[in-house]
Image: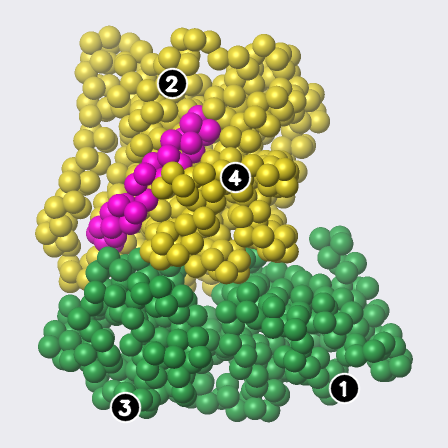
Chain colours: A green, B yellow
Amino acid sequence: MKTLAMGRRALLGAAMAFGLGGTAFADGHQVVDSIHFLIPGGAGGGWDGTARGTGEALTNAGLVGTASFENMSGGGGGKAIGYLIENADSNHGTLMVNSTPIVIRSLTGVFPHNFRDLTLVAGTIGDYAAMVVGKDSPINSMEDLLAAYDADPNSTAIGGGSVPGGMDHLVAAMVMEAAGKDALGVKYIPYDAGGKAMAALLSGEIAALSTGFSEAVDLANAGEVKIIGVTAPERVDAAPDAMTMKEQGIDTEFVNWRGFFGAPGLPEDKLAMYQDALAKMYDTPEWETVRARNGWVNIHNNGDEFKAFLEDQEQVIGDLMKKLGFL
Amino acid sequence: MLEGIMIGLQTAFSIQNLLMVIGGCLIGTFIGMLPGLGPMSIIAIMIPVAISLGDPSAALILLAGVYYGAIFGGSTSSILLNAPGVAGTVATSFDGYPMARDGKAGKALTIAAIASFCGGSIGAILLMIFAPMLSSVALLFHSAEYFALMVVGLSAIAAFAGTGQVAKAIMMTLLGLIMATVGEGALFNMPRFTMGLMDLQSGFAFITLAMAMFALPEALYLVMDPSRSKTGQSGDIKDLRITKDEAKSIAPVVGRQSLQGFFIGVLPGAGATIASFLGYAVERNIAPEKEKEQFGKGSIKGLAAPETANNAACTGSFVPLLTLGIPGSGTTAILLGALIALNVTPGPRLMVDDPQIFWAVIISMYIGNLVLLILNLPLIPYIAKILAVPRNFLIPFILFFTLMGAYIGQNNATELLLLVGFGICATILRFADYPLAPLLIGFILGGMLEDNFSRSMQLYDGISFIWERPMTLGLLVIACLLVILPSYRARRARARAAGVADGD
């Protein structure tokens, strides 16, 4: 705790020094002196990996001098958001990582804040969603799945790695809705982790699985599962055989994004600096190493684009959740 | 297959790789002793190091060393301090800690090391022979069977029934099950029983509860009753020898539990925790009447059973990982990430496309296991000496250790308040002679029990899965037998002897 507190103070000092000295300090292509990453969950999770991976790439590439990390779990991420808002003035050097659940959880009221209470820095990476079936399943396309659903909705259970009303459920409902079916009739079976949901799919307990594209792609390439639909605008290079939803006449797109937020009232110049560092990061080999290691997809949304994207996602998800009775 | 094994052996026995595995084992053992850091977190920490080595076999060998080291380190803190850092070593503390308290810490650690080694080795052999065949077995289990398996796991509380505390044990189990419902359930998008507190949203942390139920009350007891622990004067090195009779008595336990643990480990999601509880329950049930009374008071069988089972299960969990590409536990999920980062894609193609990697994984696990035993046996007397530290230094050390364990994983100071609060409640319950282990067992299994039960309910639109699925029914019957038989036998024995059973 002691070292953490000191770290934050030192960081603040560094940030202030930077503010006074301006870019004269920067050597070569360094853009930001230091960034403190606030991670709203425990060590080892998706948020943790994103923040640490991004920090590693930024420092190794020399875009940022030093990066420090702080895990603050609690309240499904709400505790860290609350902390950042309450201590906004002393957190100009902090970036918080977050992802699609910030939209979903603020809609359901898990925490009282939403993304508008923060400064939007940038969405950096993303993952499309996919509908997956086992290799021996008679289902080969979304059309087959919809036919099976029409024939017997009760035994065409769709599983996912999130709670009902969570992301995997919403994607399944969104796809069914866009295909002209009743999203309420979908029998959604929740699992507490993607791996267990995948095991359930292979064991035949569920007919199809709604999951992240990156979680399914390796198994699909190994021939264990078939990806019958991807929520991407066009086919993804990693699995060129997997058809998109749009190709199959289901007009829906979905990206599970991850990105960074600053404290409310973050000064314009600081914001621009962070955005600049993140934008430059994409061209570095160091980022490519980290990205490839984790199988992330570059989906860059800066500032205002990020805002428009989030508002749109909030709208779509909110409407769907109302329809499903979660709001 | 022989060819593959030879290639694997060749890679594993280079000087560089042997250094890797020794380094990994040492790091794993020492970090693993800290209660908050289980194998999962330590492997997560070591992955960047392993990847930077560049050579997949070297990286895997390093990680295997860390993995086994961490498991052994976890058992060490369970035995010496009654502070189980991961759910899989809770059962180890049932008999391991009473042994340490009796001044037999060295022997307890030796038994743990040897049992772990045997479990891991037999597991590795089974993995070599049966891995391809078992991939389909892993998929036989649906949610309904997992539910039934959790019920069987809960029957481990029967081990506490013989002491005349059946009602108390059941009450504590129910309390544990209730506590498992706090937080955001996996099946509803709404927080339950959090009283509006954000810190309870994700439920109680296992580590906080384990420290509060086991380590903290123990430390308080040590303060109140100095004669409770005889460890001050121990530390004799002769102590760690196992007599021939003891070896003879634990050999069948190790044999049975290696098999049982391995097969439970093969099921994705069941894992080391269930294997250790079940191993403990089964061994207690089949032990002769005289030895049965020793369980919970420092039985060497009661220590060997869960230690063997949890290691065999850890090895078993590699079956779904390597043959299907499905991680069955948190640790294998992290390892899957590491393998993918090393450009190795586990799955049915692995054995065909990259046999040398497949065998390197298995051989490196075996070597990790072996090196751990060779390294740790000579270290045990020194590790056991921790308990020879004078009480007025040891107790603050345990308290520090305990508090840090609860804090370290979550970085959340509220855990400390919960820990102290629950610790005080637990101490009071112990005064009233309520067993605390059933509470923890209930808590650990409760979440999985509920998830699998409600999933089956949803899939079958009711509870018809109980009789429609024969395997579920079979497992539930076994669970009933495991609970009822010992208390029935205990009652009969009591009626015969008309003596008073004493509980600890």
Near-viewer residue (B296 or A237): A237
Q: What kind of residue is marked 3?
A: Gly
Name the residue carrying label 3: A249
Q: Is residue B430 left or right of residue B22?
A: left
Name the residue carrying label 1: A269
- The mark lying in front, picked from 2 and 4, is 4
Q: Quadrant of residue A26?
A: bottom right
Look at 12% across and 74% down and name the residue there. Answer: A152
The image shows residue A192 at horizontal and vertical percentages of 37, 59
Are there few (<14), some (14-19), or many (20+) residues within 10 Å of tag 2? some
**Chain of the residue on which disc 4 is drawn:** B
Instruction: Determine the CA span between mark 1 and mark 3.
Output: 45 Å
Q: Check if mark 1's residue and mark 3's residue have beta carbons within 8 Å.
A: no
Q: Secondary structure at mark 2?
A: helix
Marks 1, 3 in one chain: yes
Instruction: Determine the CA span between mark 4 and mark 1.
Output: 58 Å
Q: What kind of residue is marked 4?
A: Gln
Name the residue carrying label 2: B250
Look at 60% across and 28% down and name the residue there. Answer: B375
Q: Is residue B131 magenta?
A: yes
Q: Is residue A197 magenta?
A: no
Name the residue carrying label 4: B10
Are there few (<14), some (14-19), or many (20+) residues within 10 Å of tag 1? few
Instruction: Determine the CA span between mark 2 and mark 1.
Output: 69 Å
Q: What kind of residue is marked 1?
A: Asp
The image shows residue B160 at horizontal and vertical percentages of 33, 27
Instruction: Determine the CA span between mark 3 and mark 4.
Output: 55 Å
**Chain of the residue on which disc 2 is drawn:** B
Q: Which residues are magenta?
A: B115-144
Are there few (<14), some (14-19), or many (20+) residues within 10 Å of tag 3? few
Q: Check if mark 2's residue and mark 3's residue have beta carbons within 8 Å.
A: no
Instruction: Determine the CA span between mark 2 and mark 4.
Output: 34 Å
